Amino acid sequence: MSNLGQCDSDFYQSNYTIDNQEESCNDSTAYGNLYGSRKYNNQIKTLKLGINFDHIWQKTLTVLNPLKPADGSIMNETDLAGPILFCVALGATLLLAGKVQFGYVYGMSAIGCLGIHALLNLMSSSEVSCGCVASVLGYCLLPMVILSSSAIFFSLQGTIGTMSALVIIGWCSLSASKIFISALDMEGQQLLIAYPCALLYGLFALLTVF
C-alpha cells in the first residue's frame, strides 16, 4: 500500500508540473504573438503613411539641441512631413500675429532651398538631392516658429525682439549647418555652410519681426 501511495503521489506531482509548464509556455507564446502583432501593425502603418514618426522625433530633437551630434544616416533621408508641418505652423503664427505676408514664406523657402542646394553640390564631393536640402532647412525652421509664436503675444520691434531674432537666426543656421556637415561628410566647413543658412533664416526673421 505504501508503494502504491508513493506511485500515486509521484504521478500527481508530475502531471501538475507538466500542466504548469504548458500554461507558462502558452502564456509566453501568446505574449510573443501579441507583441509581434503590434510591431507588425506599426510597420504596416508606417508603410501606408510613408512617415517614420521616430525619425521625425529624432530630427526635431536634433534641431532643438544645436550641440547634439546629428545622425547622418537619418538626416540624409528625404522626409518632408516635418518641414511641411513647420512651414504651415510658421505661416499660421504669422497670420495670428497680424502679418498677412506669410505667403512669402513659401516662396522664400523654395528660392533658398534651390540656392543652398546648388552651393552644397559645389562644396561637397557627394551629390545631395534637393529633397534632402528642403527637409533639413524645413526642420530647422522650428526655432523660427517659436519666435513667430512669441510675436502673437508681444511686439518684437525693440531691443529685446531684435536680440531674440539674432539668437533664433544663429540657432537655426547652427542646427542646419551641423546637419549638413554630418550628412555630407563635410567636417571643417560648418561656418561656410552656416553663413548662407543665416542669410536665409535672417529673411524669415525680418518677416517675423516687421
Image: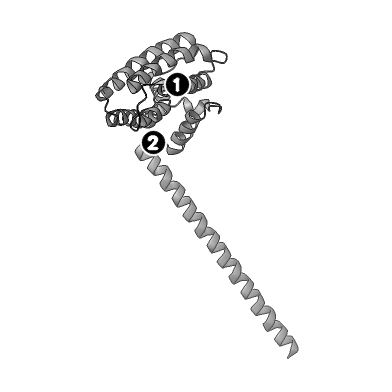
Amino acid carrying mark 1 in the image: Met
Residue at image position (36%, 31%) is 149
Vertical position of residue 57 compared to residue 100: above or below: below
Q: Residue furthest top?
A: 122
Q: Is residue 109 visible?
A: yes
Type of amino acid under label 2 = Ile
Q: Which residue is mark 2?
A: 51
- Give coordinates of residue 19: x percent, y percent: 58, 71
The residue labelled by disc 1 is: 163
Q: CA distance from mark 1 to mark 2?
A: 36 Å
Look at the image and tell me in which quarter the N terminus lies. Answer: bottom right
Going from N to C along the chain, the mark reached first, 1 or 2, is 2
Question: Does dot 1 land on a helix, a strand or a loop?
Answer: helix
Is residue 78 at all visible to an observer of this figure? Answer: no
Question: Within 10 Å of the Cα at label 2, are there few (<14), some (14-19), or many (20+) other Cα atoms?
Answer: some
Task: Name the residue nearer the viewer: 79 or 144.
Answer: 144
* Residue at horizontal 46 percent and vertical 34 percent from the top: 55
Residue 20's quadrant in the figure? bottom right
Looking at the image, is 142 positioned above or below residue 200?
below
Return the residue nearer the eye: 45 or 71.
71
Q: In this rendering, would 5 be left or right of 45?
A: right
